[in-house]
Image (cartoon, coloured by chain):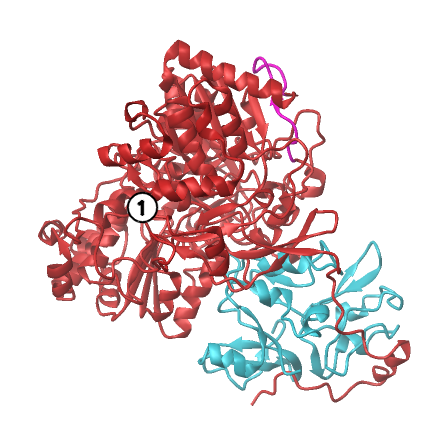
Amino acid sequence: MNRFRRKAQAAAPGIDDFRETGGETAAGWSTHTKDEKLVPTHCCFCGVQCGMYLRVASDGKVFGVEPRDHDINRLKLCPKGVTAYQQVNHPDRLTAPLMRENRNEPLKQVSWEVALDRVVSEIQRIQDTYGRDAFAIYSGSSMTTEKTYVAGKFARVALGTKNIDYNGRLCMVSAAAGNKLAFGIDRAANPWSDMLLADVILVAGANIAECFPVMTQYFWGARDRGAKLITVDPRETAFARTADIHVGLRPGTDAAFFNGVLHVIDRDGLIDEDFIANRTVSWSEVREVIRTYTPEKTGEICGLDPALIERVAHMWGEADKAMAFHARGIEHHIQGVGNVLSVINMVLATGQIGAPGKGYGTITGQGNGQGGREHGQKCDQLPGQRMIDDPEARAYISKVWGIDESELPGKGLTAVEIVHAAETGEIKGLFGLCNNPLVSMPSWSRIARSYDALEFHCQLDFFLSETSARADLVLPVTVWAEDEGVTANAEGRIVKHNKATEPPEGARTDWWIMCEIARRLDRHADKFNFDSPRAIFEELRVASKGGLADYHGVTYERIEETGGIFWPCPEEDHPGTPRLFEDRFYFPDGRARFNPVEWHPPAEEVDDAFPMRLTTGRTVAHFLSGNQTRRIGALVQQTPRPWVEVHPSLGFANGDPVRVVTRRGEVTYPALVVDTIRSDTAFVPYHWASPVAANVMTVDALDPISKIPEFKVCACRVEKGSEITKTPPPPVEPGKRPYTDELGPIDDDRPPTAPQGRGTAEG
Amino acid sequence: MDKTLFIDPGRCIGCQACVAACRECDSHRGRTMIHLDYVDEGHSGAAMPTVCMHCEDPVAPCAQVCPADAIPVGSDGIVHTAAKERCIGCGNCVHACPFGVPKLDLAEMLQFKCDMCYDRTSRGQSTMCATVCPTSAIFYGSYEELLADRPHARAVDIFGFGDDTIQTGCAVVVPAGREGQPVPGGYA
């Protein structure tokens, strides 16, 4: 029997004598100073929304992080969370508006007065000349719900434009649309703690270990209690490494796979007939479609052994309690909504939803990916997850906003369509905030052309991004630690970010900027007299009342008193709704909808010229477009640059320059040769800018329902290259010294040791 | 003190939260004392963090070979980082450690190594690496606490190097069936 941690008994000669230097080493000391303050808040990055304390010195500066025992994360943090605070006093922060008269000149600092006059006059000029809808807002979900609420109201009320959309269009919309079609509501069905009760958990297209590292504890906790894990991913990721079954399917074949699994479940009598009869409609339509998805046919489409499909079907179908999760891996497709529905069909047919340990959820990518899509910055929605074409919703929101319903615009263009419409001239002016499309949108050269075609482009940023660097006007904004407000994490749990420090002189909050512009426009100036996030939240509570995402019973105080509140929460004495669908689904008859899905190939099939599939995704040290994480030394040292991941059978050696070519463009990366990826598939992480951006190569085909781009599959070829394409440093304000010396080896041409980065011994 | 660190490579996802968190300590900001290796390069995402194992029998080879008597070993078994006023930067400890833990700062000619976050653990707190570890691949607590959370986990604190073994203050969780056998150390 091991005797862990006994006292040292056999001290070697000389060791005990060490006491002559002063006896025992000082114990009980703390590196924390007496006058520092710990401010409870949450991380700014992903949809897990880990609790954390920010350490604030007596001079008011944020200088560190301390783990926080919040219900979501129980002290745990990932490397991005640990280092997030380093953005706050970063030398690259923008602290004055930057402007130029034409794009051949460098951006120059101007006063806020000049900057606001410019944006107001450009909005007026463009709307007077080309019509209201020619000026668009493109927003984001990495900011508080209060800010996203103001963005929606700003577009519809202050500008009167129908064209507002948000960057969840690149992220959550396939899941959202699928959930609305099947359940009538767009929210994960269960709290993650339900996982600890499950017997089988299936995860499709989600690299949990790298995109949501802290969520891993729930999966491992479930496995400690005996649960089985099934992973579906073309790459055997660190999360899939120890799974009971790993399904390494071909990119772009998810719907076929889940139809095949459901075929076997049905064939072998593993469906839940009572659940189907009592709680759903349209099963027969799905049954008709899945009938042809035999394991053999499915295996052929997906590039899998048919026996694997049988095994998954039995593991899932025989489970007492099972839960399914998915993320962008199945959603970033022209059949993204269909893929989501094919998973939901499997969940519904086996009755695995609406009870403890039985459930389903998508995993939102951004910190407020859930909250940011609930309160009216989606092109087709109004606050409370209300649809903009619903007359009742329009009447209610018009009343809350104090406008005539006829003034409220209808549905506008979606995000990628807005940007493409700039190229065609339909959109002339763009106000962008909380996004970086010059890295994040597909088919980079078309996006660059579109932005360059705008007559006026204003972008809000706290670091100069690749997108703001091309703008006419850049307005400096706060980072998350400099303002308060709520977010909803991937569970649908509303938590609160607290203000830890004052913003730098010159930076403003995004909501203040929108309100200030609204006050200077001649239209409904009086509707934007918010003086605080709390004032915005109070209006949001009323605006969401009676909607699906009902926040009416949520207060800042209640959030702080609890571990967060799950919406819907209609009244202040309502406990919130951690688990959905226990009694009913959100359709008038209370029943869930089956939606038949016929698989079809991706937008771009492979051929002789482009025989492989390119797929893109994240790595753990970076976040989305990298505008934040590419500036943090520890993260850059972990993962300084992108690479291409290829199978050893292609004949490349680790570190070889390998050129990835698609119909849109080509980049030469160092090869990371691993046998954890399919031999017909290449992977490139997407956090870096052109010329190494994955989106130089991706296809901009969109799902017809959700309008999500097909980031996860296009046709490519890989060939021996010569020069590895250099990684550009993050942009900085003209005249400022680039911070690259301190950052680390972005010039380095080596691939990482593993997809998660460089080992600490690699230097 | 009956709490120690248990390392479970089976749970590790290689995210390097431990490395980032170690760097945050006010006594060695910007420098990590924990090592993170991807141990199955090219074949899997497997990874393993290495902390100081606080060798007990034989006690602290690093301290034993130190010609300057610079590495204190507390009566609680903690093998500390070399005292700056005594360390001569000779690197003997680097060569003596069976786990490759101590490193030299070549600019300062001083050794640095993991001391189980003595500032935190001596006050009853968990180490920073174990606190943040998303998967609890690094666990701080007693063996009983570990088993309460993971009934099937089995840990070993004896490592074999050829014919020699070393008993450590920290332990690793081993695959089923390997309980009671020394963990193979180093390269065969």
Residue A411, picture quadrant: top left
Residue segment shown in magenta? A93-107
- From the top left corner, tell me how far across and down residue A606 is, in percent: 31, 37
> What quarter of the picture does the N terminus of chain A occupy?
bottom right
List x then y, in percent, for residue A555: 45, 51
Residue A491 location in percent, x, y? 39, 55
Q: Which chain is red?
A: A
Q: Residue at x 40, y 27 (%)?
A: A155
The picture places residue A353, in percent across and down from the top left corner, at 25, 61
Residue A98 within the magenta-colored segment of the rendering: yes
Q: Chain of mark 1?
A: A
Q: Amino acid at mark 1?
A: Ala
**Residue behind mark 1:** A175
Q: Closest to the observer: A523 or A261?
A: A523
Q: Is residue B8 visible?
A: yes
Check the rendered structure and report the hue given to chain B: cyan
Q: Residue at x 41, y 45 (%)?
A: A371
